[in-house]
Image (cartoon, rainbow, N blue to C red):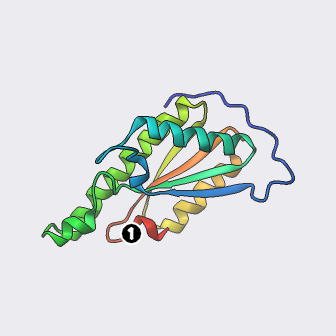
Amino acid sequence: MTQAATTTAVPDPALRYRRILLKLSGEALLGDRQYGVDPAFCAFIAKQVGEVHRLGVQVGIVVGGGNIFRGLAAAAKGMDRATGDYIGMLATVMNGLALQDALERAGVQIGIVVGGGNIFRGLAASARGMDRATGDYIGMLATVMNGLALQDAL
């Protein structure tokens, strides 16, 4: 992972929130495309997230994978439900990598957390990591490796 330099402002005391969680559906990464990831639209998202981050707000991002694969839809057509969910989780990781690239090109350091097992333990570890990190870091929870659980349930 490339280490990009970022200048983060001291948090403004007037800011309503010091830490936010942004949930992006996979479809948000489509841009003008019918399928996959639009790099230009990822860059647009990264620019906006970077602006919020530079205000001094810690940003966590949860991204879905529905622009690439939908496990539930595949299960409705006969695929094993767990298999479909695992393929969808890989799609989520792919989207996380696309966003990581866009954010780093926008000058924001980013880390991807791929959680497994206990979702709440994974979320708590991500939050603790953000507490210990410098202000120049955005955390991303890319996916939860737990079949039969919807990403949007986070």
> Does residue 122 show up?
yes
User: Which residue in the protein does label 1 denote?
Assistant: 150
* Residue at (71% x, 39% y) in the render: 54
Instruction: Work out which residue is located at the far right of the displayed protein and give it.
Output: 13
Side of 137 relative to 24 (left or right): right
Tell me the SS state at disc 1: loop
**How far from the left and from the top, in percent, is residue 15?**
80, 54
Q: Number of numbered discs present?
A: 1
**Front in this rendered view, residue 143 or 115:** 143
> Does residue 134 show up?
no
* Residue at (54% x, 32% y) in the render: 104
Residue type at mark 1 is: Leu
Residue 31 lies in quadrant:
top left
**Front in this rendered view, residue 14 or 113:** 14
Side of 81 relative to 120 (left or right): left
Is disc 1 surrounded by few (<14), some (14 to 19) or many (20+) residues within 10 Å?
some
**Front in this rendered view, residue 111 or 19:** 19
